[in-house]
Amino acid sequence: MNGKQHTYNMGIVGNCSFMAYIDMYAEVKWMCMPRFDSSFLFGSLLDSEKGGTFRISPAEDIIQHRQYYLENTNVLCTEFECADGAFRVTDFAPRFYQNDRYFRPLMLLRKIEPLEGRPMVRVVCRPVGEYGRALPEVLLGSNHIRYMNIGPHIRLTTDISLNNIVDEKAFVLSEPRYLLFSCELPLESGLTDTFESFLKKTVSYWREWVKTTSIPSIYQEAIIRSSLVLKLHQYEDTGGIIASGSMSLPEFDQSGRNWDYRYCWMRDTYYTLYALNSIGHFEESQKYFQYIENIIATEKARIQPLYSITGEKVLTETITGLKGYMDNNAPVRLGNEAYTHIQNDVYGQVLVSLMPLYVDKRLSIHSANKPLQIIHFLLDKIEETLYTPDAGLWEFRNSMQLHCYTFLFHWAGSRAALKIGTEMNDESLIKKARNLILLSSEQIEKCYSAEKKAYTQAIGSDHMDASCLKLVSMGYLDPNSAKAHDHITAIERELKTENGFIYRYRHEDDFGRPESTFLVCAFWYAEALACIGRLDDANKALENLIRTSNHLGLFSEDVGLDGSQWGNFPQTYSHVGLMNAVFRLARKLDKPLYG
């Protein structure tokens, strides 16, 4: 990287059916269809030659350009100024309510409109299939191009000369031009009217969605953008929420730590649903509950750490022939071996996530429809795995330990089960939950190091782990106690960098010693500071972390020591971490909520 700070200079558009990544040069760098975890149709993000592209660019040299979202929407605009004029590209995926359902077709809509002069513009559209292994047969219709034999039925409908697009020839932009890239769906009505109608309705939908979002009086823009990002990562058909729409973006340059994150992690359920509940979006929470309920209904032995968006269990990890990010970050991994791992915190994660659906009177699940067998199953699994080593939150591939974080969620999940049992008058649930709360606490205390005055990663381990910050924010440690303050001080001493970022851990793992920090850990740190009353420090930490977003307010998974963005992007875990930390600080500051 030649010492230059690295940033993902792109935004996302989507409609809860698919997402497209579009960079500051109006190139679609990544788009998978018809699902989040389908093969990409455009994937130059991971291979400039095999990945295909969908690019709208000026024919002349660029004088300046900028990219922004229309306020409170997921509609993305990219503007160019060149010697021969200026123009804007508007990108979005339609989403709005009609005919008693949300209309969210597999369509990417792109508008090119002149702003000044008569600029020369070039459109290049080269979709591919099978992760770059399949090239299409190109057929021209009257006003559309069909791309055959790359999977789904793909077409580009446009009022631009089809030959100019196929020949990749520049043309004069004298009036607005439209492109509608679709999967399976032919356009049945006029292109211009359809586009403008869909754009108006989509802008209205997102702005109304934001209006119904509860936000604190601090960091409002960051909360709104994070909420919009989180919404885009929910696959509405099933309710599953993916960790990221990207795959194999490295944790740092040449790291080899390249993972496919287009799946639903059970470890994220608590944090994600907590954030959704905080912003008052219970519809999304209930959809996610339905996804989790369907997962549990099919499981007899154990819950995996992750599943596909449709609940598929086998996510075999393979290596593709792609060059990788920046054409030099192989291997590119498809699938994720973590589905085979043992992560016993998942049972507590899901229990804590489901608790509001049983005890929060605002939610619409009626008592007769609250399936207590799910709660019994999860609590039984906590009892069964209480003393069993696991791979832990960070999915260590070649080590099993008795992790403090796992015990914390045994404790938190048992407490959630106790509240549910009390609400539902289930004596057997109450009795077992109370016993497991005590047993879990005993195991957590075995992770305490008197020498460090802190809780370590696992029983018998000297390693500090940022996940143990959750001992404070989840209420295991009294935030007013010396033990909580000492614990955070120890994490600062061993895991905090000079510029305020937080490592997950510092010891070597299966791939060597980590060089980048994990962004959500720094948000956990800010939240823990707020819990113990270090409010100025928490606020300064948040101000510092928000600066790690890109030009559109989007956060990556990892942050380098120089503030560079790395890892998969945007990462819902990071955005959820911001949301939960800000809401915690707002409550401690007694700042009002709006919405």
Image (cartoon, rainbow, N blue to C red):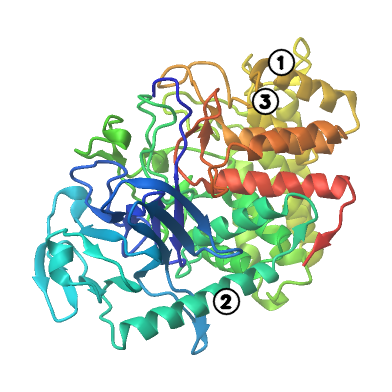
Q: Mark 1 vs mark 3: which is more N-terminal?
A: 1
Q: Position of residue 94 (x, y in %)?
A: 44, 73
Q: Are marks 2 and 3 in contact (CB under 8 Å)?
A: no
Displayed quadrant of residue 231 = bottom right
- Disc count in the image? 3
Residue at 61% x, 32% y: name it.
387
Q: Mark 2 vs mark 3: which is more N-terminal?
A: 2
Disc assigned to residue 493: 1
Could you give the CA–CA distance between mark 1 and mark 3, rounded to whole angstroms? Answer: 11 Å
Could you give the CA–CA distance between mark 1 and mark 2, rounded to whole angstroms? Answer: 48 Å
Which residue is identified by label 2?
204
Quarter of the C terminus within the rendering:
bottom right
Residue 560 located left or right of residue 497: left
Could you give the CA–CA distance between mark 2 and mark 3, rounded to whole angstroms? Answer: 39 Å
Q: Position of residue 56 (x, y in %)?
A: 30, 58
Which residue is identified by label 3?
500
Q: Position of residue 345 (x, y in %)?
A: 59, 41
User: Which one is closest to the eye, mark 1 or mark 3?
Assistant: 3
Residue 170 located left or right of residue 304: left
- Is residue 439 visible to us here? no
Mark 3: few/some/many CA within 10 Å (<14, 14-19, 20+): some
